[in-house]
């Protein structure tokens, strides 16, 4: 018997359930293979992402964690030669299905990248970017969205007096929280974070982690991280990715509640990785 | 001295050699930079020393050109040059930047785009007198425009279009992919991303290309020899009327003019041209800086 995040006993769930359960899970990835040209980057990926939980993807560099993340809001579409087989369900609907609205998808599932990438615009214009794209013109409404998003991203107090200043002048940690605010402004349901703290110092990292704990009350979060302590501290579920040999596709070795993965992993490779013996 | 004894002789020698090389390189590079500055400074200095006194004479700068008598002014030439520059830029920028957007954002990499790029780069090296002859054949003769402002502007547009397109394309390519990803990731369409993020981010680079083009337009004479009048007493009053730009008129004044003070007029024109180019550069730079500050592009 193992316990999930609420401390209730649940059956071990080493891999995703065979049939997607739409009520509990926001995102269900089924038998996903990803190709870059002839190269198979991912094979047989199955993950369920529960509503209002933080799901972490861990594993060695280059094992395809980010690629999975990017296929959840179809950013891989932009990569020439990238091709996906299998399904990714968002609330029961296959996002790779014919005629699926990619713009709507990206609005519902926002992405925060490894390096903070604010636009070379003012703080205000960065946050207002998404709402403006979706046609919000009313000044008062924009003001409100910008303030709310910055408050939620725990940045408001630091920038409220200088919204017209360039976002480029902010520190790395502030820029990353600005990028989170920018995503929050389009009112997504899910947030994907691709190693959001990789370029940040420990204090800025701590702030982002606190923020994510707060945000999961409202949003469903998936985070890729190289930092295992971060995954252990932060996440409710963890998927461990690996490539067996150079040139092989990345696979999920084990997926389950974070405390199970970090205390009693089923797979020996998971244990070796989390205890730091390889990778 | 004790400390140094522990350093092996060879290592010490290597360190000294590296230091010497460093000093030599610094001195040589400094000298080369100074040579460039000296050449530039002496040309501008010579032009200004010879011409400033002429330029500051209001009768010269604001006066009417004279074909035969001494004491002619250059105001119509200055105005012609300014009109010509504005008209050429109005023609060139939308086409050049539009083509650059297509090349950088939509065309992808194929044999055809490589061919277009190669063609543009080759075209940029064609001597301007060849464009002048082409403009004569096409605009002046075939289209029946005669030598006029529009014929000159179209010829200069052809001459400078490849460079504008290529510099704009490079500026667009230099916009980090992370901006595009961020925008698309927020649900923006490709066109929204280009219009609201990529293009504004490329404005400084595009402006730099534009400023260089302004300088080339103002200084161009060969391409205008057959496409605009070389001498006219009035500035153009319409797109298709004549008017002589200052650079080709400078050449004309020194080689063909029969006014007794041709030498003095040429010196004044040279100084006026240099000052005009500097002034337009400063204005363009000022506008670009203000745009960047307003956009919040600089921290």
Image (cartoon, helix red, strand yellow):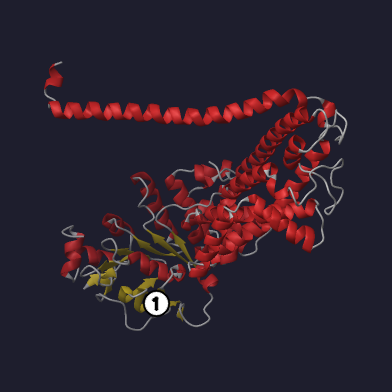
Query: What residue is rendered at 68% in x and 26% in y?
Result: B48
Q: Which residue is mark 1?
A: A84
Residue in the foreground of this view, choosing between B141 and B82: B141
Q: Can you say whether A148 is above or below A258 in the image?
A: above
Percent from the top left, x then y, of residue B125? 57, 52
B62 left or right, relative to A36: right
Q: Can you say whether B151 is above or below B74 in the image?
A: below
Residue furthest out toward the top: B1
Q: Can you say whether B157 is above or below A2 in the image?
A: above
User: Which quadrant is the N terminus of chain A positioned in?
Assistant: bottom left
Would you identify the image quadrant in which residue A232 lies?
bottom left
Q: Dot 1 lies on which element?
A: strand
The reply to whether residue A55 is visible in this rendering is no
Would you identify the image quadrant in which residue A138 lies?
bottom right
Percent from the top left, x then y, of residue A28? 39, 76
Count of numbered badges drawn on the protein: 1
Chain of the residue displaying label 1: A
The reply to whether residue B29 is visible in this rendering is yes
């Amino acid at each position: 018997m193992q316990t999930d995040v609420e401390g209730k006993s649940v059956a071990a769930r080493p891999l995703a359930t065979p049939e997607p359960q739409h009520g509990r899970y926001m995102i269900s990835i089924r038998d996903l293979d990803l190709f870059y040209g002839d190269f198979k980057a991912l094979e047989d990926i199955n993950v369920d992402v529960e509503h209002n939980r933080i799901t972490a993807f861990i594993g060695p560099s280059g094992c395809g964690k980010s690629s999975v993340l990017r296929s959840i809001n179809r950013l891989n579409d932009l990569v020439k030669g990238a091709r996906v087989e299998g399904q990714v369900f968002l609330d029961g609907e296959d996002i790779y299905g014919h005629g699926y609205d990619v713009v709507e998808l990206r609005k519902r599932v926002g992405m925060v990248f490894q390096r903070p990438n604010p636009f070379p615009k003012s703080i205000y214009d960065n946050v207002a970017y998404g709402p403006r794209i979706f046609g919000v013109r009313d000044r008062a409404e924009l003001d409100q969205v910008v303030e709310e998003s910055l408050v939620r991203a725990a940045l408001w107090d630091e920038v409220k007096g200088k919204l017209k200043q360039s976002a480029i002048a902010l520190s790395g940690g502030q820029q990353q929280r600005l990028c989170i605010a920018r995503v929050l402004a389009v009112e997504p349901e899910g947030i994907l974070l691709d190693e959001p703290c990789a370029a940040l110092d420990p204090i800025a990292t701590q702030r982002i982690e606190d923020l994510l704990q707060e945000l999961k009350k409202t949003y469903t979060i998936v985070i890729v991280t190289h930092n295992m302590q971060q995954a252990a501290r932060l996440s409710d579920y963890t998927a461990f990715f690996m490539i067996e040999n150079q040139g092989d596709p990345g696979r999920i070795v084990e997926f389950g509640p974070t405390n199970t993965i970090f205390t009693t992993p089923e797979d020996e490779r998971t244990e070796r990785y989390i205890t730091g013996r390889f990778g | 001295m004790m400390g140094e004894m522990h350093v092996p002789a060879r290592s010490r020698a290597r360190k000294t050699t590296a230091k010497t090389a460093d000093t030599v390189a610094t001195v040589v590079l400094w000298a080369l930079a100074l040579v460039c500055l000296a050449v530039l400074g002496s040309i501008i200095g010579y032009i200004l020393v010879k011409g400033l006194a002429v330029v500051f004479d209001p009768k010269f700068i604001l006066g009417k050109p004279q074909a035969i008598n001494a004491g002619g002014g250059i105001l119509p030439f200055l105005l012609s040059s300014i009109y010509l520059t504005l008209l050429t830029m109005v023609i060139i920028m939308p086409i050049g930047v539009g083509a650059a957007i297509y090349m950088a954002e939509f065309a992808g990499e194929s044999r055809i785009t490589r061919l277009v790029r190669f063609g543009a780069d080759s075209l940029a090296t064609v001597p301007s007198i060849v464009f002048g002859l082409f403009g004569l054949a096409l605009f002046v003769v075939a289209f029946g425009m005669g030598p006029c402002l529009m014929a000159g502007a179209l010829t200069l547009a052809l001459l400078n279009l490849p460079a504008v397109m290529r510099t704009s394309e490079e500026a667009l390519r230099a916009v980090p992919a992370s901006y595009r990803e961020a925008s698309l990731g927020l649900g923006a369409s490709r066109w929204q991303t280009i219009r609201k993020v990529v293009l504004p981010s490329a404005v400084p680079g595009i402006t730099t290309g534009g400023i260089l083009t302004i300088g080339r337009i103002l200084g161009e004479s060969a391409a205008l020899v057959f496409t605009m009048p070389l001498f006219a007493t009035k500035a153009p009053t319409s797109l298709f009327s004549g008017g002589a730009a200052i650079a080709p008129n400078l050449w004309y004044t020194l080689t063909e003019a029969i006014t007794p003070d041709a030498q003095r007029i040429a010196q004044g024109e040279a100084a006026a041209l240099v000052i005009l180019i500097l002034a337009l550069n400063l204005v363009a730079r000022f506008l670009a800086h203000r745009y960047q500050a307003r956009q919040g592009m600089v921290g």
